Amino acid sequence: MDESEDVPKDFIKLKSEKLSVAEVSELVSSPYCGAVSLFIGTTRNNFEGKKVIHLEYEAYTSMAETEIKKICRDVRQKWPSVKHIAVHHRLGVVPITEASVIIAVSSPHRAESLEAVTYCINTLKASVPIWKKEMYEDEYSWKENKECFWANSEK
Amino acid sequence: GGERLCPPQVSVLYFARSAELAGLRRETLRVPRQVTALQLWEEIVSVHPRLAVIRDQVVFAVRQEYVLLGDQLLVLQPGDEVAIIPPISGG
């Protein structure tokens, strides 16, 4: 097999349509990889006793894509055997139990892809300009990731 | 050619809570060519006073690089994007 035909790729997409685990897994599959690791972020139906009706996401799209590309570059530096990386994030309204984000990484052996997926989601939460609004029955709340260093720590 | 002396027009982008407080998502503002991040914030608040309440919770993104609201000197070019970035919650 000619490995040059399977150049490592980053698949980054922000979209309003429903995300597909099958599609994202397929994007990173490779005959050289024995492992595909996945993270799926889904929508919980409650927060501090309040019923969550749905989530709404918005993004500074161009910068979000750039920041995700930086994360992919960092992954490849830390785990050079990683083959493909896919990060799909949903924007707009996300109903309860549906996926907000899917991250998939392929590598020849499982340790690297498992660690890389963890690094991707943790770093995404700290650095990618995407915002989540949680809609309750009578009110809503802009969420703040604890990883975000400029959030109000008292919240 | 000579240096242009007039203050540049930059695109200011508002997101999440800052868009709600400012009442818009995007506008063009004429700002000083050289300004600290904090001074730029004060300029924007003078146009949208309701933004003052989130001052301690936002950073800027200037040409898509995060900048704290502090003493860092910004050299702005015409057409630069400056975004107000409330605490993020992706993922």
Image (tube, grey):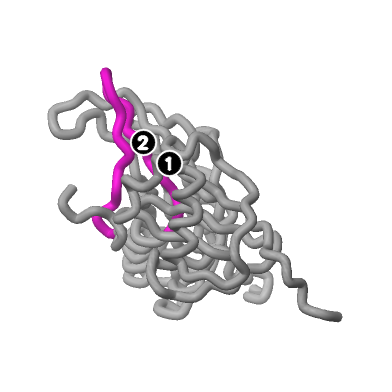
Q: Label 1: few (<14), some or many (≥20) within 10 Å?
A: many
Q: Amino acid at mark 1?
A: Ala
Q: Judge whether A137 appears above or below A75 on screen.
A: above
Lateral position of residue A155 relative to residue A148, left or right:
left
Query: Which of label 1 and label 2 is nearer to you?
Result: 1
Tell me the number on the disc at residue A152.
none
Q: Residue at x 67, y 76 (%)?
A: A4
The picture places residue A63, in percent across and down from the top left corner, at 55, 58
Q: Chain of mark 2?
A: A
Q: Judge whether A80 appears above or below A66 on screen.
A: below
Task: Tell me if residue A70 is in the magenta stretch.
Answer: no
Residue B50 image-quadrant placement: top left
The front one of B22 and A104 is B22
The picture places residue A112, in percent across and down from the top left corner, at 37, 71
- The answer to whether any part of residue A33 appears in the image is no
Q: Secondary structure at mark 1?
A: helix
Tell me the number on the disc at residue A133.
2
The picture places residue B86, in percent across and down from the top left corner, at 38, 50
Lateral position of residue A150 relative to residue A89, left or right:
left
The front one of A20 and B35 is B35
Q: Residue at x 14, y 33 (%)?
A: A48
- The answer to whether any part of residue A127 appears in the image is yes
Q: Chain of mark 1?
A: B
Q: Amino acid at mark 2?
A: Lys
Task: Tell me if residue A129 is in the magenta stretch.
Answer: yes
The front one of A76 and A2 is A76
Q: Residue at x 77, y 72 (%)?
A: B4
Identify the magenta region. Answer: A128-147
Q: Please identify the quadrant where the N terminus of chain A is shown.
A: bottom right
Tell me the number on the disc at residue B16.
1
